[in-house]
Structure formats: structure tokens, C-alpha cells
Image (spheres, grey):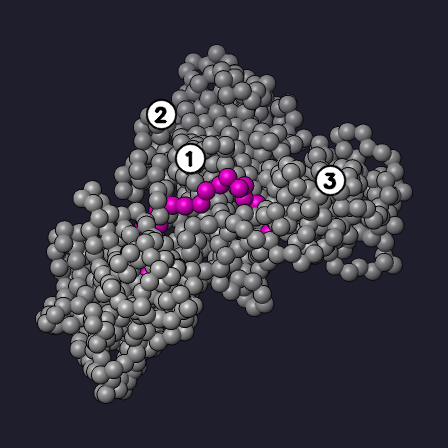
Amino acid sequence: MLPLRSFCAVFASSVIVDAFPSPRLRPQTSQAAPSKIPLQHRPRSGDEPISPEEISLQDLKLLVDSSSTLPPRDPDGEYTIRLHWHDLVKFMASSSPENPASTSSHDETTSHEVNVVVSGDAPSFPPRRKSNASQGRRPSGRTATPQSVLDDDRAGEDDSYRGSKGESSLPAGTVYQPGTYPTPDLLGSPISKFALLSDPVSYTSDRIQQALNSLGPYSTLYLPPRTRWVVKEAIHLQPHQELATMGYPEDGKEIAWLEADESCNGHIISGTNMPGIRIRNVGFDGGMEQYGPSKDREVMIKLGDSQGINQAVDRCILRHPRGWSCLQVFEGAEGVRITNNRVGPAGYDESVMGEKGYWADGISYAGLNGLIAGNIVTDATDGGIVIFGAPGTLVTSNTVVTRTRMASGAINLVDHLPYKGDYVGTIVVHNTIRMEGSFLGIGVAQGPSVWWLPKPNETPTYNYGAVVRFNLITAAPNTTSSVGYGFAVSEVDDWMCTDNEVSPNVVFQGDTSGMPREPRVASLPPGPFVRAPSLVGSGPTNSVLQAEFVEGPIHYLVGIRPGEPTYKTFLPGQLTLGLGEAVVLRGVRLSFDADGEVRLSSLGDAGEVVLWEAGCRNLEGIKGDSKLSFDWLGRLGIVSGDGQMLCPLTSRLQPAIPDLILELSSERPHLFIASLVTGSVYWSPMGYEVGWHWQAKEGSFVCLTTPDSRTVFLSGMNPLGQYVILRSVGDVVVPPTLPWPVSQEQWQVDWKSHEVDSDQTDHESYIWFQDDGNLVIYSGTTGLPLWATASDEGPLPAIHLRWSLESADGLAMTLVSRDGTVTWKSVAESQHTQLASP
């Protein structure tokens, strides 16, 4: 007897209930199935094969056990549940027979006999293999499938079934090859009445629209194979209409093509609020290659909306949209299926289309309880598959390829709207991302800050509820393409990202100069698995992530571009250079030279130019075993072989400040030490520099020290809402946060932004370098500006904010435009403007 309870909502829309008698659970597929199969999980060895039928029964039993309400009985009093194989695959992504987390207890006294009928071709299941991860062996290495998680007796075997955690009855990556996902309900026959649009007066969208209008709802309009139709304005479908090529051919040379004319600034197909429409075996070309981007930047195929129920796009070709996506399913839709399509190319990056580029998605999806399966998306420059929440949607067996155009993201789950972060029941499982020649920014992007930079004082928003499992990032043999970040997770809650894999031949690197560099919004360097802190454990960000994730700050990873890295970040203990060794990035070199000197040099066409020297040359005690070290206490200096500090470069820095980093960069300021927690810059021998969107709050500061280390300057926000520059008096160490009120024996105020009432505090105020070239202090309580540099009125806005030491004035802050013009300077009091306090 098998207890039956109602299916959870995520499966309910795809389950059909009917009835016929059966003594036990018995799967029936399109192939012959045995009449009797045992339900019990019998013990077996780790490598013993399990038949597809038995595997399906184990998972089906869990699926049925997760119900709580019986379906209606038939006249004979029997129960039957019908479902498709993609429901089973979806269930297997969120639960397994060994750890059925999604099931709950049930009352055995309410058991009933049921019959389960599974349609479609059963997936091919490999033998189950026991993972060592479940035996407490922690995976190591940069891929999701290190040798340490494999059974010892598998050495030398094909590693396509490797899993980083737990067990899987399917290898990571696609289950079905592109174009082969089962769609048994999409028959090779019309919906009802139909017409073949043969021998038209003109091969234009007008003729297609006339025929659709004449047929009306519940009809199929066939286009002749190998025909091409010019689309001058959007074609509108009616409820339960199908547009297809006669005979449903799949060859791109056989299908009918709808090609946008230059006058078609909107959509090629408009199907919003039209239930039951189907678009099958038709090619669509938006005309981007011929006409460039359209004025309105609309999507090529527009579906979904509140009445867009049970729509389908199957085995179509969609390419060259003139807007921001090949296909968009808008929110409110339910049960929309996008299957077995060939999508892309779509859009161009800024290297082709200028400074902004004209990015475009392959598939953009915001519907409920839908299906995206069996598609291949090639060279979609923005997102290959972009999920806008889409609660209850299954994304499986899709292949995303980068071949000739850079792509920002392959599969994106970053948008907080339109469902306010609700991804509950959204399952991204068994997809493949493949590099074949061009750069990919992010493989699977998860969470808002992966894609965007937070605004000043913005409260973080969290996406919640998704499952991302058994996906594979791989690369073609001998490809020169690379990936910036593989699986990136930030600002998520109740999220699962496990059992994903990265092939060993995938290279992770990229030019990070377009990403924020200041400590508050800095990010981890490129890598296969990166996540923001505090995502695992109890509390508001309780998520389950696989062990390979590296923790660190994540902001605006989409800013990465192809090329060599432009900066490198070291944690304490990660930088050690022997005599004659160096760290080299594009255009810059940090070296511990044979004469004992530490040098920072630029590398260019004119050769090597020394930018800075530490002053340690020929220092007594430096010999062959000496090292340049950024040690575990966050101190940078030359140490002897026995660990004695011989030449401290950061002698004024208080030890053990939390989460310090040392950054070497191809761009100014080239070398600095900062804290990821406080946001302060504690040491920077060549001054400091930031770009637009830099911000600072109370307590964080920029510190510069004179070359002789005798005088320390701090500049930062105090609790009164002022930005101040402090000069040390006497012997001081650099504190973790800006000291306030200042001790007259240690600090003096060299400069302040504006006068305030010393009795009033504004702990939430902040300073922000805006993209109009203005430096502004905002009140944290009212949001109104308190002070500004008024430097946004010149012909060119400032793009750099610099801190530098000047012999006469000490520390100075300057705003500098693209052509080098100084638009404001802190020591010139007359050039700043005080605004009235609210």
C-alpha cells in the first residue's frame, strides 16, 4: 500500500489525474515496462547497476509520498496519477532517495493503492556511485569534481559522472541533447481547423495576419516549407492559435522564415494575454545584422502576461533581435513552455557597437510554473537564459554556448523583480554551459549584487527559494576562450546550489578594471565558485552551497571583460617573494630585487620605469633567505629567514585589523592595503584614487603616510556628517577606524568639508562621488545633500578623486577630469559650496 498525498504546487500544473485499477505502483512509459516491480529500496553495493525502471520507482515513490490529498476517484473507486518524465527529473533535483528532504511524515492509516503512469521516453540512468563526500572527505581544488570526491576504484575512468557532493543518478550537464526534449503533447497535426498559406499574393506579415484573423481561435496556420516572409509589423495571434511550418520540419533550410523589415521596430510576434498559442518549427530573424538596433528596442517574440496560459514555442530558430531579447515571457503567465529551440546570436558587446554596446538575451522568462528545456542558446551577449523569479519553473537540459561573441552571463537568477525575489520552486538542473571560442563573464549568476552595484545606503535585497544543481561548465578542446566566474552567489536566502561541476580544462581569468575596486564594493578575483559571506547557516540567509565555494565580497561581477587581469588581491599570508622574484600584471611589476630593494615599476613600450622604491636597499641583515612578506598579521615588509622583521613598510599600521587585503593593480593607485570590513585604506605609498560611485560612511578613512613614516594623515567621515582630514601630532599608530572626537595630543584637523553644530550627530551620513563629477555629502536621516564641491559645471566632469601628499599643504584631495584638469581641490576653501542643512 502506498500513501498518497497531494502534489506540492510546483508539480501540480503538470500532473493529469485519471483512474484505472492496479494492485501496486507500476510505471508505464512509451516503451514496454515490466508488470511487477518491487517498491522497496533493497541494499546494494556502490557500483551495482540499477535499472531505469527501478530508479524511476524510487523517485516516484518519494514524489507520491510528498502528497497529502487524494485525487478524485473514478467510478470503480481507483486512483491514478499521470505525469511526464520532466516532472520526475525536476523532483530528483530537489530530493533523493537517500535524503528525501522535501518529504514529510504521513499517517500510515490513510494509505491507498495508486497507479502512476509516466509518459515520454525515460532518461538513461547510469549506475549510482557512492560519493566520498558523504563520508566526511572535504573536496579540494578549483573544480567541482576533484579527485578527492571520487571512489578510489574509479581511477582512470571517464569523469563525466563525477559529483562534488552526495549522489546523483544522472551525470552533471544536460540529460537530453539540444532539440530532443520530449514533447508528446505537441502532435504532428493541427489544433483543430487549419489552413495552408500557399501561393499568397505577397510573402509578407500582412498576408499571415489576414489568414490568422480569418481562421480565428482554436486553429493552426501552416506556412509552406522553404518560404521567407517579410515582417513589417508585429503579427498578433489569437487564443489557442498555432503558427507552424507545414510538416513540422526541423532543418533550418526546410522551415519557413519570418524576417523583420527595417520598418519593424517592435515585435515579430505578439502573443501576450493569449492562452494556448503555439509557435512551432518556424525561423525568426530580427534583422540586427542588416539594420542595427531598432528605435524601440523591443523583444522579438513577446509572450505571457496574465492571460498567457499554456503557451508553447518549440523547435524554432530565433536570431538577431534588434531589441533586448529574442523571446520574453512576461510575468503573470503560467505553464509556458520554451523547448528545443535554437536561439542566437543576439546583440553585440561594446567592442563592436561602441561604448554602451547593444546587449541582448536569448530567452527571458518571468512566467509561473513553466518549462525551459532542450534549447541551445549560442552567442547571446547579455544573458543566455534569464530567469526573472519565475516561481515553479523548471530549467533543464539547455545548452548555452559562447562561440564568436562575448556573453555577460549564461544562466541568470539575479533579478529581484517582478516577484520581489521569489524563486520558490524555480529549479535549474542538468544544464550545460560550453565555451567554444569567446569570453563568458559569469556561468550561473545568482543574487542581485552579482549583477549590480548597490546604491549608497541601499538596503540589500535578497532572492530566495531556488535550486541550482547538477549543472556543468565545460570548454571545447584547445579553445582559447575563458570564463570570469563560474557559479557566483550573493544576496540569496533559502537557496540551494550543490553538485555542480566545472571541467578541468576551463580557464578562469579576465580584465577586472571595469569592476569596482574600492574596498566597500571590491570583489573576489575570477574563479569557478565564489560566494558572498554569511550565506550558509542559520538566520536570514540560510542556504545550502557546495564545499568548493570561496567566500569573499561580490559586487558587479558583470563588469569583468576578456583579457589579462588588471589587479590581484592577496590575503594575509598569501604574498611571499624571495630575492629576485616579482609579481607581474599587465603593465605593472612588484619586485623584491637582488639588491634588497622593493620596487613598483610600470611596464610599457618605453621599457620598465620605477614608480616607487621602499628604501630598503643594502639594508643590513638582508640576505639570500630574506623574503618580502604580507604576513598573517597584515604587515608588509622584508623578513629574515627566521621570521624577524628587517624592513617594515607598514610600521604605523596597527596589527590584526580584520579582513585586510593587499592589492596590486595595473591602474592607480597600483598598491595599497585596505580592510574589507571597515572599508578603510590603511596604506598606499603612491597616494590613492577612486572613480565614480565611490562612497564612504562614518569611521572609514583613507590613510597616507609621509615617506619617512613620521606623519600620518587620515581623511574620512566623522559622526557629525563632516568629511575631515586629520594630521598626526607626535608618535601614533593607524587606528582601525577614524578617531573622533580627536585627541589634541595625537591629531589635529587640517581640513573639514563644512561647519556643523557639534552637538548634533548624523551617524548614517555618507559622501558619494557622483557620475556628474560632483562630490556630495548626504544626510543619512533625510537623504538631502549637506555639502557639495559644485564641480559639475565645467565642460568635462571629473572622473577621478585623488588623495596625494603635497609638501606645503600635507594631504590634499582633488577631482580630476578626463583631460587632467583639476575641477576641485580640498585645500582651496573657496571652491567648495556649503548647502543649507535640512
Please tell me whether residue 647 is drawn above or below residue 820 in the rendered image.
below
Q: Quadrant of residue 235?
A: top left
Q: Over which residues does the magenta segment extend?
A: 498-519
Disc 2 residue type?
A: Asp
Is residue 727 a member of the stretch shown in magenta? no
Q: Callout 2: helix, strand or loop?
A: loop
Image mark for residue 180: none
Expressed as whole percent of the image width and height from the top left, the position of residue 582 reads 33, 53
Q: Earlier in the sequence, mark 1 or mark 3?
A: 3
Q: Earlier in the sequence, mark 1 or mark 2?
A: 2
The residue where tag 2 is placed is 261
Which of the pair 499/618 is nearer the observer? 618
Identity of the residue drawn at 51% across and 51% down: 529
Please tell me whether residue 594 is drawn above or below residue 266 in the rendered image.
below
The residue where tag 3 is placed is 127
Disc 3 and disc 2: Cα gap in Å? 53 Å
Please tell me whether residue 672 is drawn above or below residue 730 in the rendered image.
above
Mark 2 and mark 3 in contact (Cβ < 8 Å)?
Answer: no
Q: Earlier in the sequence, mark 3 or mark 2?
A: 3
Which of the pair 121/505 is nearer the observer? 505
Viewer-nearest of discs 3 and 2: 3
The residue where tag 1 is placed is 480
Viewer-nearest of discs 1 and 3: 1
> Is 340 left or right of 580, judged from the image as shown?
right
Identity of the residue drawn at 60% across and 31% down: 177
Q: Is residue 457 visible?
A: no
Crowd tier of the residue under label 2, counting other residues whose Cα lies within 10 Å: few below 14, some 14–19, many 20 or above? many
Which of the pair 606/576 is nearer the observer? 576
Identity of the residue drawn at 38% across and 61% down: 625
Secondary structure that dominates the magenta span: loop
